Amino acid sequence: MALELNDRSVRISVRRLVEFLLRSGDLDNRITGAAKVDAMAEGSRIHRKIQKAQRAEYRAEVTLKQTFVRAGFDITVEGRADGIFPHDGHEIIDEIKGVYTDVLAMEAPVPVHLAQAKCYALFYAMDQDLAEVGVRMTYCNLDAEEEIRFFEESYSVPALAEWFEDILSQLLRWVEYLYEARMARNASIRPLEFPFPYRKGQRDLAVSVYRTAERERRLFIQAPTGIGKTMSVLYPSVKAVGEGLADRIFYLTAKTITRTAAEEALRTLREKGLSFSAVTLTAKEKMCILEKPDCNPMSCPRAKGHFDRVGEAVYDVITHEKEITRDVILTYAEKHQVCPFEFSLDITDFCDGIIGDYNYAFDPDVRLARFFADAPKEKYIFLIDEAHNLPARAREMYSASLTKEDILGAKRLFGKKKTRLTRDLDCLNRRMLELKRCCTEEFTAVDDIADLIGDADTLYSSMQKYADQHPEFEGRDVFMEFYFELRSFLNTWSLVDEHYRIYSEIDREGKFVVRLFCVNPVRNLGNCLEQASAVVFFSATLIPLPYYRELLSNQEEDYTVYVNSPFPQENRLLLLGNDVTSRYRRRGEDEYRKIAEYIRTVVRAKRGNYIVFCPSYFFMEQVADAFGDETDTEIVLQSRSMGERDREAFLQAFEEERTGSFAAFCVMGGIFSEGIDLTEERLIGTVIVGTGLPMVCTEQKVLQEYFDRDGKSGFAFAYQYPGMTKVLQAAGRVIRTMKDRGVIVLLDDRFTHYEYRAMFPREWNDAKIVHIRNIGEYLERFWRGWERKDKRNGKDGSEEPDGAGTAAEEIEYVPFEEPV
């Protein structure tokens, strides 16, 4: 509802008030008018045009507000009337709406629009002590500006007052709920203590997060896997909310599994007495009751009358639940027969915390407009988990493509029909053909696409009108898929600046594509980050820091924290194989056999579970073939397409008891590279083959060229840094608790070079360089030392094992960037 609550004072805009309390009817994705790429800008322009065309006595943009005292609350409702003018002895309130529907076919104003105008009419009448006031609804078609439709009505002020009193009574129960919930929340936070004994460095980390919220700054946290980062950032953020330093927490993640960690942390705090509501947002496809989402009353029974029921559904869930997970949402959505996804979005208005994907805060097509469309009236804390994933995700969010073959696919739906729509499709297709003729290399930089954008915008308007006029037609799915592609392209064009590169190419499928590629997302992300009062980026792999600051928040005043690992180094053996490589030019049977021999030596040194990470599926399959059938080692390979059940079965294999070793072959950077917890005996070693460099492709080449021109190492920014992030994430699977012990083996001679050693975390200063002939000796000493210790003291990790720290070539320690 986006109301501002300060003690017993309430502020809410007229628009937000009526949109939440008075909405009704169906969910219907067949109505596309609201999705126009420039609807807001166009609507403002139309407002000004209509206002300037009025007579001299017409007053535009009149601010109106009234404060009502109800149940001990001062409720201020405010907004701006588009216009006020005298007519036949009466004052008329004018409400102007620019729309993309056929205004001449309208039989009555949209009820919510009319309600907005009636609020302004009442407020103006109260100010001027009027007995009667008029309302004029002015609708203008944004495509055909000469099409204007008026609806006029007069109201007695007592009737308006009675009508508005009913709205206030509806609002009051929400205000009372929020007030009581907030008082209970703050009272529960004051005595709340950290729920566990602090690990080394954890208290300092929590203090840093609190100070970041207090000083309204941004903080980068590099902290090792397993230290308890989730609780270390959530607890001080919750305390900051209780102290009035923030109003709401957004816990933003890249993957579903890390959302679970946030839910569990809040659950732990609630067990200690915390009263704090949080909702977890899940993608529409995973929430929908249909096989494929189709939000309209003809396809989905929940869509019909959704808005008539959703208000009660929201009130029901927020008054009975504090932990509002996906399953809770599905249960209440079933009870009230509403769309689970849209229901979850409405719940966010009444929760202290929102847990969800990055896109809810950053993606221009998906972000939560109710919080971010205007300048926030609340203070938000953004907690950005696994922040190393954000640069790549942001590039994806802020980039877009237009494909010539998709234009032709949309055109084929209409055969040989000659209409304005097909003419516009032809026009855009010819424009793309001109660009294709200029695309003589693997990709070609495009300097000027103004004409293409003009044709695309014209086509978009035609598609908009056609979709609104034809709710059902054969091929609508294909039509709408291209419609959204075109919308995204036009939306992205409005963001293009010096951080973008525009190019054309013929892709691997032979399709011609024009790409708006966001090389550096720092500005676009910055616009979103400015809407938070404090931001915390945290990950086990924010190395090197200058790389992430360049792409995420390049502000000199940002704080940085490096948390040393609390886990004893003797629990982990780190080995670098210097006589193998994953370089393309060296790949072949001999190299695959040598890598397989390394893996064989590792898994034979001690019976247990291991993960082998490879650069690609093909590479993984070749190494697995070279590994062969080991009688005492069971192997399993990650498949190219794994559903939820397949993933669960894959991880379940680590729970089984075996007489020999188990080796899971996976792809580096894939679904098993991060966010999985295989503690103690469930995983005792990982072998990482290669440096994780991304595949050479157009985007990586464009990235390299951009950063080279910017005076930085383009190869490092495009390849080495993202690659090392994958390596560090894969390595982080091994040591996750104080009781864990295991081996990490990096197989590529490049890891012994300075430019790679410079990217190692501090705790890797004990890395040992080995080769195929002596790696077995290091492994034997490491495991033999732990076997002797276990016999003496049990597995408490308190003593150094025999054989630890044996002489070997040591890696140079390269300091992390000091805090600013």
Image (cartoon, grey):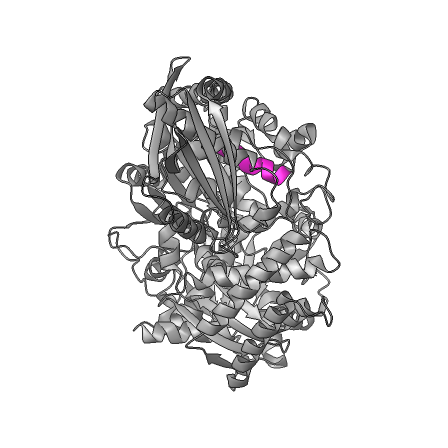
Report the residue at 70% width, 57% height from top: 476
Using residue 241 as the reference point, say whether residue 385 is left or right of it. right
Q: Residue 544, how many percent across, how many down?
A: 36, 61
Residue 96 sits in quarter? top left
The residue furthest front is 88
Which of the two residues, 807 or 22, is positioned nearer the viewer here?
22
Can you see residue 689? Answer: no
Q: Residue 617, how many percent across, how many down?
A: 63, 68
Q: Main secondary structure of the magenta part?
A: helix
Q: Residue 225, how many percent across, how many down?
A: 46, 49
Residue 718 sits in quarter? bottom left
Residue range corresponding to the magenta coloring: 340-352
Which of the two residues, 664 or 527, is positioned nearer the viewer here?
527
Which of the two residues, 10 or 755, is positioned nearer the viewer here?
10
Report the residue at 52% width, 58% height from top: 730
Q: Is residue 365 shown above or below 614?
A: above
Q: How many marks?
A: 0
Can you see residue 109? Answer: yes
Q: Is residue 760 shown above or below 567?
A: below
Residue 535 covered by magenta stretch: no
Q: Is residue 87 shown above or below 734?
A: above
Q: Residue 587, how many percent across, how many down?
A: 57, 80
The residue furthest right is 474
Q: Is residue 401 shown above or below 709?
A: above
Residue 345 covered by magenta stretch: yes
Which of the two residues, 692 or 575, is positioned nearer the viewer here?
692
The residue furthest top is 71
